[in-house]
Image: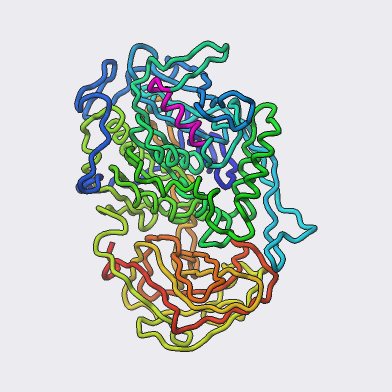
Amino acid sequence: MRCFARLALVGVLAFSTACAATAPAARTLSGTTGAVPPAGGTGVPPGTPAPAPSRPAGQVPSGLRVEDGATQPVTTLAAARHERVHVEVPGVDSDADGRPDRVEVTLVRPAGDLEAAAIITASPYLGGGNRVRNHVVDVDRTGRPLKGLRAPLQSPLTASEPDTYLDDYFVPRGYAVLHVRPLGTAGSTGCPTTGGRPEVAGAKAVIDWLNGRARAFREDGSPARATWASGDAGMIGVSWDGTIPNAVAATGVEGLKTIVPIAGISSWYAYYRANGAVTAPGGYQGEDADVMAAFTLTRKNPPAACTRLIERMTRDQDRRTGDYNGFWAERDYLKDAGKVTASVFAVQGLNDWNVRPDQAVSWWQAVRTPRKLWLHQGAHHDPMSFRTAEWVRQLHAWFDHFLYGLDNGITAEPPVDVETAPGRWDTHGAWPPAGVRTLTFRPSGDTLTSGPARPGRARFTDQKARTAEQLVTRLTRRDPNRLAWLTPPLTEPVHLAGAPEVTTGAERAGPSPTLTALLVDLGPGRRPTGELEPTGKERCFEPEVCQYLFRWETANTPWKIVSRGWTDARSGTVRWALQPQDHVFAKGHRIALVLLSTDPEYTLRYPPGTRVTVDLGQTSLRLPVLPDGRS
């Protein structure tokens, strides 16, 4: 079993990021077990037609074997056919060589005459990654990087051939699995653009090829036609690999029947910016779109045109103002959610501060096709790594239904699964769930109350040395570098389900334009860290296809930052949303709202000393909650 050192967006659907102490001799997948949720409900928004498969419902393609509403093994992975082709991307010449760009595709498909549906992953990481430098985040009063500082380097990544549970599980059951190297990476031509139009067009071209609308060529230059393909395709992936399915679906391409984005991005602006503030994914300060383009420029002999393209990205992404512009609009798939015709099965970690929860929640709420949503207690993980049996059941049924037209009841199951505590899953008909109401809190002295607004002012001074976590360690004490208001101990649980919202009036005297808000659960408890630990057990789906089983690591902590959010606060009164969360504040705990300026692990670090004056009469915290703390 292999371990991956993860970059900010590495999310290969392969072996788990945690390693067991001992590995079984059998071939491994990646993940753990979980409880099966109750059935009932619907996975389709009212009045929404399902994407139609290419064949009539209930008509099983010749060569498939179906039992109990599920495809069954008809071959072995060892007997499958392996091919490598290069798909032409019509109208795209990102490397300016006068020829259409091509994406490299390797595929595994059942041998024989079966018209196979395709499961596609597109990963910029298959070509490895270069040792490139992030941006300096310590800036002067005007926002320019301080001279003489050097930002940390991205850790290099070794190129690899795909080896995933998709091949292991789905190819024997009659599916083709395709692995795409986006433009500028591995054996593809063109240049990487980090979510830009060329990247999207490259992945879309593969679906066009499966449907006879694009050309492909073998290694020897001869034409390659997908005569074996049914034309129906699904896309799946984790992180950047889960972002490309969102992007391709937003084109409305014919033939894409479903996508399964796991920790996928729906807006690159929201990934690298927040309401006008320049931010970073958790753990990767100074990373930006241009850095990841340079990191994944792994094609052979990259031309000077790619260097010039990345230099334009550096300029156009605009790290000075943090404003939304044409560069970010090109990489905003939410604005094109109305074009999506594919069904969507989205998965997101509530403790993922790399690809944060707003990415999946905003996307899931924007699309109007049949959809499912899993919200789990982990960080940046594939569900195969923590809820193995139920993930395989639902994913298998989802692909069978939307790619082979099997009437297996998957869309009649509850559309939302939420893990409210490690291993405890609740189901809902929507998220936020029906019945959510808004609790509004306002500051009164050092207390957070549900009473009316009270006039007054409070002040703090910005600094950049202490992290947000350090600033909340003693919330019951005043601190010159932040403001904090706490509720009295709760007399009953409060179940947050949605995105908290903060409003405040602030005046600044100094260079830092950023306001950071933290929502804190103050009280002792054993909480998930977001990471995995091995159980020492395994589960086998076939005699030689087994999976190590994991569970969430937990730790006793006196508090937890439940949610956070950032905004540019150059103007007077500002209102901004924090990250959506599903979290229960226990009876006896206290809810805290904390305001600071620089969040050193996420925002630009201006010179210290900015004085921030907060108008208490204009300050409030709005929480969407389920009544009586119920699930």
Q: Give the range drawn in magenta.
A: 199-213
Is residue 202 part of the magenta span, yes or no?
yes
Vertical position of residue 480 compared to residue 74: above or below: below
Vertical position of residue 169 compared to residue 453: above or below: above
Is residue 377 part of the magenta span, yes or no?
no
In the displayed structure image, the side of residue 128 where residue 260 appears, left or right: left
Q: Position of residue 571 (x, y in %)?
A: 53, 73
Q: Where is residue 265 in the image (x, y as percent from the top left)?
A: 47, 47
Task: Identify the residue at image location x=32%, y=38%.
Answer: 341
Task: Identify the residue at image location x=48%, y=85%.
Answer: 446
Query: Predominant secondary structure in magenta?
Result: helix
Task: Identify the residue at image location x=68%, y=76%.
Answer: 609
From this viewpoint, which residue is outermost toward the right?
148
Number of numbered discs on residues:
0
Quarter occupied by residue 249: top left
Name the foreground residue: 8 vs 249.
249
Name the foreground residue: 348 vs 250.
250
Residue 252 shows in this picture = yes
Task: Identify the residue at image location x=32%, y=67%.
Answer: 625
**Quadrant housing the C terminus:** bottom left
Name the foreground residue: 308 vs 184.
308
Q: Where is residue 388 in the image (x, y as percent from the top left)?
A: 38, 40
Vertical position of residue 282 compared to residue 493: above or below: above
Residue 523 shows in this picture = no
Q: Where is residue 69 in the image (x, y as percent from the top left)?
A: 22, 30
